[in-house]
Amino acid sequence: MNTRWSLAVLCLGALAIVGTSSAAPAPPAATAAISIVDDTGVRLVLKRPAQRIVSLTPGGTEMLFAAGAGSRIVATVRGSDAPAAAKAIPTIGDANALDYERLVALKPDVVVVWEDLTNRLVVESLRTLKLPLYFIRAKGLADIPRSVRKLGTLAGTRAVADPAAAALESKLATVTGRPAAGPPLRVFYMIWAEPLYTVGNRHIISDAIGRCGGRNIFDDIDFPAPIVEIEAIVKRNPEVMLMSAPPITARDWRERWAQFKTVQAVATRQMLSFSDTRLDRMGPTAIDAVDGLCKMLDQARAALKRDGQKPAAG
């Protein structure tokens, strides 16, 4: 199952590196008890920093490596393929279905889940098993370094996590406040065709689009990856469609949209393949993917201007 489809399935069930070198053994963790508040505001108390971690999200796995805790991950889920060292970690399913017997046998100190992306039934099962849970919540790009820093506290690897988070913040500053030549482009970001998934305002991609001089046409939906209807897309009339798919798949999607010629993106052929999976994964390398997204929207804006299409405000 590819990263994009995994993201779509996970969100239905719930209805991108600084620090890659941290695959090497992390600094020894302190043995004193820790008390930490996760990204959702829930306090977790452990007898010591986590030595055995199960990560149930590809983005969380990437964050843990950035935080210097990659060597502490004892299991993860399908799609956790970044950094390269993560591919060697055993998988126990995905965020919709887990091998609970194997999970319990691993005796994890903590299970890292992602709010909204882990099936609620899975979360309830984990609670029934009385496993310590730590929730990641990242609605915007600025949340990524904050989460990396806190995961360093969770694992007792702040010596790696703090400078890694600072480096991410510095990198993010280079894409903050990117000036746009004109009003924001109305952008529809397509994750999948059947059902038709997009991103809402609780997804990092929506933030990235805004930083690149665009506006997610579904930024009024308070959910990471909602299902939407074709009629709603036609009504909101995007100027650009970004198709989160490799070129061949995007070609098929464009053919499906060809009949909707009242949609500006269709009429002007601004239906573009965005094949960088780092934004979908929402790990630290998502920040690296923003520049490519911005360049694509800049090119779309230039093409619209060249063809006499004035980007509409709002």
Image: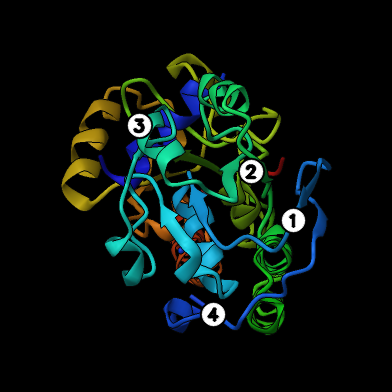
Tags 1 and 3 touching, CB below 8 Å:
no
Q: Secondary structure at mark 2?
A: loop
Q: Where is residue 24 drawn, in percent x and y?
A: 43, 83
Which residue does the numbered mark 3 point to in the structure image? 99
Tag 3: amino acid = Asp
How packed mark 4 is, by other alpha carbons closer than 10 Å (few <14, some 14-19, many 20 or more), is many
Which residue does the numbered mark 1 point to in the structure image? 47
Tags 2 and 3 touching, CB below 8 Å:
no
How packed mark 2 is, by other alpha carbons closer than 10 Å (few <14, some 14-19, many 20 or more), is few
| Label 4 or label 3, whichever comes before in sequence order | 4
Q: Secondary structure at mark 3?
A: loop
Which residue does the numbered mark 4 point to in the structure image? 26
> Count the marks: how many?
4
| Label 2 or label 3, whichever comes before in sequence order | 3
Q: Where is residue 266 drawn, in percent x and y?
A: 36, 36
Tag 2: amino acid = Ala
Q: Residue at 58%, 47% (x, y): give it.
A: 112
Pick the front one: 1 or 151:
151
Tag 1: amino acid = Lys
In space, the residues marked 4 and 3 are separated at their CA atoms by 27 Å
Residue 264 is marked as none
Pick the front one: 226 or 252:
226
| Label 1 or label 3, whichever comes before in sequence order | 1
Which residue does the numbered mark 2 point to in the structure image? 312
Q: Where is residue 221 drawn, in percent x and y?
A: 67, 27
Pick the front one: 8 or 10:
10
How packed mark 1 is, by other alpha carbons closer than 10 Å (few <14, some 14-19, many 20 or more), is few
| Label 4 or label 1, whichever comes before in sequence order | 4
| Label 1 or label 2, whichever comes before in sequence order | 1
Q: Secondary structure at mark 1?
A: loop
In space, the residues marked 4 and 2 are separated at their CA atoms by 51 Å
